[in-house]
Image: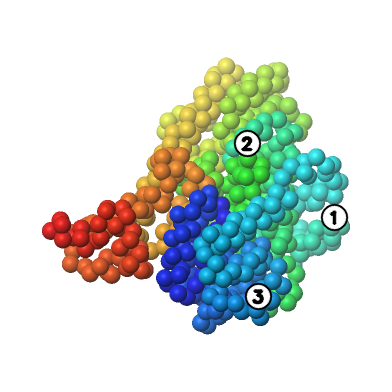
Amino acid sequence: MQRMLIVDDEPVILDGLHAFFQKADFQDMEIIKAYSAFEAIEWLNTVKIDIVLSDICMPGMDGMELIEKIMDRWPRCKVLLLTGHNEFDYAHQAIRNPCVVDYLLKTEGMAHIRAAVERALKQISEENDFHYQNAWFKSKLPRALPQLQRQLLLDVMKRTEKEGIASLQEELDAVQLPLRSGEPVIPVIIRVEEWSEYQSHSDRSLIRYAVANVAEELLQDKTTVKAIDLDYQVISCLIQPLVEHSRFPSNQQERWEQTYRFVYGTLESVQQSCADCLKLSVSIMVSDQAVEWADLNSTIARLRLSIHDGPGLGMEKLLRVQLHSDSDYTPNLLSQQAVATLHMDQVKERITAGEREWLDSFHKWTEAAQAGLQDPFFRMKIITGAGNGLIEILHELGLYESAMEEITLSRMLHFNIHTPWPELVVFYQTAYEWIISKRSDTRLNDQSQILIAIHHYIKHHLEDDLSLTRIAQEVSLNPSYLSRWYKRITGKGISDYIHDRRIERSKELLLGSNCKMHEISAKVGFSDQHYFYRFFKKAIGCTPQEYREQKN
């Protein structure tokens, strides 16, 4: 999804441009308006902006000053400048700025302005194609150094003592990682939700590498970042501010706030690039604060668990996770020597991912385990590993309490080396089938809860910000994904639902209150009363005043 911010201090012009582009058939683009440069900066501090269409002459801050603010926050943003008359000094300055793609006279008309926006969108698309399309798939990928870097970071993520971090900078330098051991890091988790056509292990390995590259490419504009795949389904990014230079504020707190704002806004683009270029659905979880290297282990575990916080499992979540001291989570270590344990690991991965192939891995586990059951110690290891694996999955999916009641989980407490093997197999197969069934039911219930939350928010905030971005924040979903998902589920767009609720609320206020027209206009989200008149008349066929008089 792209976002265009329109900035003008003249309400009539701004509302006209906003209405024009709202009606234009730009697919998957959100239009935001700001009545001043200062309001525009608030938006730039809140969400990632792809295109800015701005007046040059505004009180308090002119267009050239605004450009500097834009570049400082979103270096890849494209700027279109509007003016009411020829200002050659401005034009000369604007052309020299790399983020300005056009300089337009307001008198040139809407068609000319629209064409400029289309050129900006095409430029963004071409840049994305250059970075993320399939060209790099066809080249040989360097393997040695990336593998060494991955192994080091995986090792660092297991360290929980500060002593283990003492020599970290030397280790980072040895494998040419630009991260700094003396500063905290912002950890990010990217989880693949749907593999689409990528079914083989080699394809998925390559795609995980692609996701890591997409994240690094987009985030490296204003941060130092390294992305690695943690396992079959999850990629992790470790992020720090760039080394201080003139464009960064000297105040450390402001420096980190600026970095975090950029990171969170750019993660939306990471999701979008994965969807557009890789045909991949991903969720992203980022911590709400930078953490020390020694705390990475527990923080990564908390981020991985957060995917199950609230409804929406399997959807493209975008979560800012609050960290808690009691969130430690240590996964079981895999024994590389035991074939049965490896198959059980595949069962856990596929159950957690909701894949149908889990049953194949389960049968392989039973066959491999059965071969060594004569040894009581091997048998004890198999029983313990199966029990721990099931409990781990239930905790990770948030189903532990339900399982205690519905599948008599306490039976596992009585399993021992004398328990008949067929009884164990039936118990665990039944438990895994219950999990798959429960996840399917949960997903349907999640969809219902999210729809209820969206509709409740819209109904009670008609006079507030009802941008797609704001609604998506309310349900912790990617805005572009939310737009597609809502239309698929309901058959119409979110803007149509907002339109209907505004008309409905307008009628209620016209007939059930003594509010004046400008008051009603404001209550249903229109800053311009005249625009409210046109909106109502187009929908109902008469003006608000005529409607009130006819019904009364």
Give the number of the disc on residue 175.
1
Q: Quadrant of residue 81?
A: bottom right
Residue depth check, mark 3 versus mark 1: number of the one nearer the observer: 3
Between marks 2 and 1 in the image, the one whose residue lies nearer the viewer: 2
Seen from the viewer's position, the closer of residues 241 and 85 is 85
Q: Viewed as shown, does residue 268 lie left or right of 405?
A: right
Q: What residue sits 57% from the left and 65% below the top?
A: 52
Q: Quadrant of the C terminus?
A: bottom left
Q: Secondary structure at mark 1?
A: loop
Q: Is residue 188 above or below residue 392?
A: below
Front residue of 385/450: it is 450
| Left or right: 457 in relation to 331 | left
Q: Is residue 6 above or below residue 378?
A: below
Q: Residues within 10 Å of mark 1 (few under 14, many from 20)?
A: some
Residue ID at (48%, 43%): 485
Residue position marked by numbered label 2 in the rendering = 195
**C-alpha span from label 2 to label 1:** 31 Å
Q: In the structure shown, which secondary structural element does the residue marked by tag 2 occupy?
A: loop
Taking the image as drawn, is residue 71 in sight?
yes
Residue situated furthest left in the rendering:
552
Which labelled disc corresponds to residue 91? 3
Task: Answer with mark 3 or mark 1, whichever residue precedes in sequence.
Answer: 3
